[in-house]
């Protein structure tokens, strides 16, 4: 349970809000690379409550500008993508990718007015199939994003995004919540899994350790980038079964690697607030040692979207929940792991009222997550550096790889944290 005041603090992302200021210290995804064609149509982009427009000029460079023309406010989503930049259709003022005004044909030839005009613009860095932006003070801009998957060939990576109709935090909390896998993602019968997959579109097998483990140990381990979310259960139901240990790195400001064991494909998530009540959820599936089977992952996740990245299974059609499927198919009656996640988080409402909830012992990760966000806001307000921004953190070395270990071995020994991510006591992002 959280006070209404704290709930407001950790969910509101607009300009000038404490959380909005925190998000504006990190690089965040603005859109997919595939959404912007050289010389193509500009793309409306709303991020952290700000209305922006992205475009790719004919040379391939991306600009991210304020949506409204600095002249008299016409939307630049209607603009021409011309040689001189993004040209407003009202009076032809044009803007380069950095916001400089390159043409002002409505003013007399002798006018130097255009030298004084600059459109709002944010820096863009394109890597890993995503155009990232940094919306904070220029002098505090961190190093560009670098993850284990950003440098992989396309054959080993699949990047997708889906529109979600709720605040980013309840989506991120769902990522931390190990226990929901045994219910929201439960398939009622055993199924054959495809190579690299944890589930089918129905869900995970009833024999999976996430389902069968009794009284698993749930814990978090602070790191320099956030924390590791740990699950320690039993690999099977036999007496003296091996331990089944999962680790999921949770990264500021709203990213996560999902838990997995050795043979499974990797998955990275970024939950990017469009505004207070809607979110872009990015899925980055990847493999390190073999080409990724895109179809397997698309199907099991149920990433069926329209041309605007809005899902076909959504709130308006009750996620196509099928009561007969609930009898023999899966626990939720909904197809697609991702749709199951969206149903449980979106149905809470746009911003869940955390003052009305009843947290149990299985919510240890959720509590740690909120504590980290609150602590990060306070650090920033005191002029200190929130987690994940130290330039010495080798973010490209972060990934999840759970293990099966003999009984009795402490999980910190069986699945140790890479010492480069060990925080000093003062930097512990989870505890005060
Ligand atoms: S409003 Fe855009 S050029 Fe006049
Ligand atoms: Fe889930």
Image (cartoon, rainbow, N blue to C red):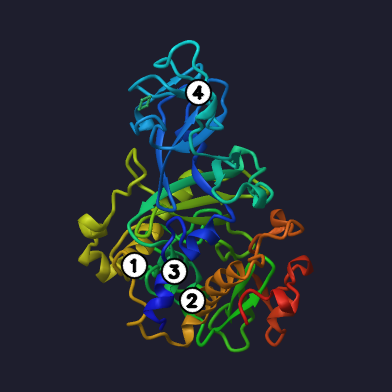
Label 2 and label 3: CA atoms lie apart by: 8 Å
Among the 4 quarters of the image, the one containing residue 90: top left
Which type of secondary structure does the marked residue at label 2 adopt? Answer: helix
Q: Earlier in the sequence, mark 4 or mark 1?
A: 4
Give coordinates of residue 182: x percent, y percent: 42, 75
- Nearer to me, 337 or 50: 50
Q: Is residue 292 above or below residue 429?
A: above
Question: For ligand 2, which image quadrant applies?
Answer: bottom left
Instruction: Label 1, secondary structure: give it.
Output: loop
Q: Earlier in the sequence, mark 2 or mark 4?
A: 4
Are discs 2 and 4 less than 8 Å apart at CB? no
Label 1 or label 2, whichever comes before in sequence order? 1
> Which residue in the structure is indicated by mark 1?
351
> Which image quadrant: the C terminus?
bottom right
Residue plotted at (65% across, 52% down): 140
Residue bearing mark 3: 174
Numbered circle sitting on residue 114 = 4
Relative to 164, does residue 58 appear above or below in the rendering? above
Residue, disc 2: 366
The nearer-to-camera label among 1 and 3 is 1
Coordinates of residue 388 in the picture (x, y in percent):
66, 62
111 or 233, nearer to the observer: 111
Dot 1 or dot 3, earlier in sequence? 3
| Sequence-first disc among 4 and 3 | 4
Crowding near the residue tagged with mark 2, few <14, some 14–19, many ≥20 C-alpha atoms within 10 Å: many
Distance from disc 2 to disc 4, alpha carbons, whole Å, reads 51 Å
What secondary structure is found at the residue carrying circle 4? helix
């Amino acid at each position: 349970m959280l006070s209404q005041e704290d709930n407001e603090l950790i969910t509101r992302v607009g300009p000038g809000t404490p959380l909005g200021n925190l998000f504006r210290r990190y690089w965040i995804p603005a859109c997919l690379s595939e959404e912007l064609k050289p010389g193509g149509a500009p793309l409306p982009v709303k991020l952290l409550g700000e209305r922006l427009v992205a475009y790719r000029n004919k040379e391939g460079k991306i600009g991210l500008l304020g949506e409204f023309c600095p002249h008299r406010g016409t939307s630049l989503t209607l603009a021409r993508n011309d040689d001189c930049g993004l040209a407003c259709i009202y009076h032809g003022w044009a803007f380069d990718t950095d916001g400089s005004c390159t043409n002002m044909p409505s003013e007399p030839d002798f006018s130097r007015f255009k030298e004084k005009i600059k459109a709002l613009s944010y820096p863009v860095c394109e890597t890993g199939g995503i155009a990232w932006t940094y919306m904070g003070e220029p002098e505090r801009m961190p190093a560009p994003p670098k993850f284990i998957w950003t440098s992989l060939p396309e054959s080993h990576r699949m990047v997708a995004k889906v529109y979600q109709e709720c605040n980013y935090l309840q989506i991120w909390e769902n990522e931390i919540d190990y226990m929901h896998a045994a219910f929201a993602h439960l398939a009622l019968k055993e199924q054959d899994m495809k190579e690299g997959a944890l589930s089918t579109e129905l869900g995970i097998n009833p024999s999976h350790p996430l389902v069968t483990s009794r009284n698993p140990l749930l814990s978090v381990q602070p790191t320099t980038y956030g924390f590791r979310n740990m699950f320690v259960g039993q690999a099977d139901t036999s007496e003296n079964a091996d331990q089944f240990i999962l680790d999921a790195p949770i990264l500021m400001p709203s990213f996560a690697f999902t838990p997995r064991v050795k043979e499974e494909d990797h998955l990275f998530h970024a939950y990017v607030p469009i505004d207070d009540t809607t979110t872009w959820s990015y899925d980055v599936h990847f493999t390190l040692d073999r080409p990724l089977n895109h179809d397997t992952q698309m199907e099991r996740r149920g990433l069926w979207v329209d041309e605007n990245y809005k899902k076909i299974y959504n709130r308006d059609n009750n996620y196509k929940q099928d009561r007969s499927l609930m009898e023999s198919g899966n626990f939720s009656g909904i197809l697609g792991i991702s749709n199951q996640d969206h149903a449980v988080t979106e149905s809470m409402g746009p911003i869940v009222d955390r003052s009305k909830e009843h947290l149990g012992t299985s919510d240890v990760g959720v509590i740690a997550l909120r504590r980290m966000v609150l602590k990060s806001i306070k650090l920033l307000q005191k002029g200190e550096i929130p987690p994940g921004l130290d330039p010495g953190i080798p973010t490209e070395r972060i990934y999840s790889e759970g293990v099966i270990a003999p009984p009795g071995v402490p999980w910190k020994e069986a699945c140790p944290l890479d010492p480069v991510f060990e925080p000093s006591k003062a930097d512990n992002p989870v505890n005060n």
